[in-house]
Image (tube, grey):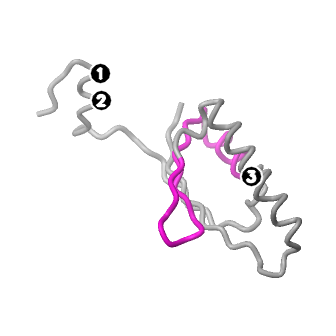
Amino acid sequence: MMLYAVRMDVAIPHDLDPGHRQELISAEKALCHELQRAGEWVHIWRVAGAYSNISIFDVADNERLHEILWSLPLFPYMRVQVDPLATHPSDLAVADAAGTDPK
């Protein structure tokens, strides 16, 4: 599995039909919850003061992440930044799990 930090900045057009807007937001939330239950959308944090989030995904590969992002109902209205993550040698949790002392 591979970890990714993904920032999603949402800009829904103000003139979008309010009913359609609500449908998109509801569908986005439902898919987010489904992916969280499946263990692929590990964390989601709101960016204070913005219609944005930073999320952590744990997926099989780049293709799976691409598939998830493109399936998001709000994707057409997003600017997305993806950063692959790797274990940091100073992470105490990793050292504890491995039974080693990070010096």
Camera-near label (1 vs 3) is 3
- The residue labelled by disc 1 is 97
- Whether 57 is among the magenta residues is yes
Residue 6 percent location from the top left of the image: 54, 54
- The local secondary structure at tag 1 comes to helix
Camera-near label (2 vs 3) is 3
**Would residue 22 appear left or right of 60 to someone viewing this image?**
right
> Marks 1 and 3, Cα distance to the nearest angstrom?
35 Å
Local packing at callout 2 (Cα closer than 10 Å; few below 14, some 14-19, many 20+) is some
Find the magenta span and give its range.
44-69
In the foreground, 102 or 46: 46
- The residue labelled by disc 2 is 94
For the point 88% across and 73% down, which residue is it? 17
Residue 51 percent location from the top left of the image: 60, 68
- The local secondary structure at tag 2 comes to helix
Mark positioned earlier in the residue sequence (2 or 3): 3
- The residue labelled by disc 3 is 28
For the point 39% across and 41% down, which residue is it? 86
Q: Are marks 1 and 2 in contact (CB under 8 Å)?
A: yes
- The local secondary structure at tag 3 comes to helix
Q: Residue furthest bottom?
A: 15
